[in-house]
Amino acid sequence: MARVPDGGDLIPNPVSGAPGIRIGNLLLMAGVPHITAGMLEGLTGQLEGGRPIVSVTIGGFIPESEVASLLRDAERSHDNISIGSYPFFKEGRVGSNFVVRSDDGELAGRVANELADKLRGAGFAVTEGGI
């Protein structure tokens, strides 16, 4: 059903039959969650674990475009951190949730607190846990 790159192995798919592909530590699987779950069951005991990623969310009725530089600076000033920005429109207002991620939970919390302080300093109300 598909061409498999050299060095790739098929991942059995007990749900719909179309296999996934494994190349080293890269797994290509179905985008449908219940199909992927079936494929993952077949990989039990074959995947290496790592440190869990910790996510800390803050948010508010904060237009993403108005704080892009704060987000960029917060992410660039810390190694091992990523910040996702998720805009929304709710209650007739524009807002965003900001998710700080790291495999170092203490660092993620510290960076989220620093970002919240900077957002407050810029005049925005911040909600811990997001909106």
Image (tube, rainbow, N blue to C red):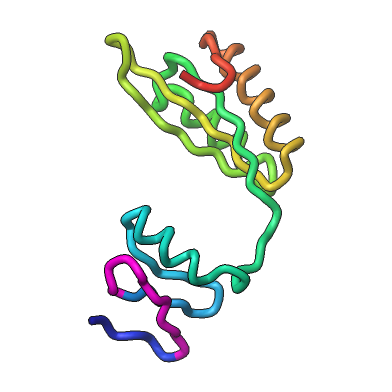
Percent of width and height locating residue 54: 64, 41
Percent of width and height locating residue 7: 47, 89
Instruction: Give the residue furthest to the bottom.
Output: 6
Residue 25, quarter of picture: bottom right
Residue 113, quarter of picture: top right
Percent of width and height locating residue 6: 42, 91
Percent of width and height locating residue 99: 54, 33
Nearest the eye: 14 or 49 = 14
Q: Residue 13 magenta-drawn? A: yes
Rendered residue at 64%/28% (across/down):
112
Left or right, 105 with respect to 71, comes to right
Label total for image? 0
**Range covered by the magenta-colored residues:** 7-18
Instruction: Give the residue furthest to the front.
Output: 14
Look at the picture and state if 120 lies above or below 40: above
Look at the picture and state if 118 lies above or below 110: above
Left or right, 3 with respect to 23, comes to left
Rendered residue at 44%/84% (across/down):
9
Image quarter where the N terminus lies is bottom left
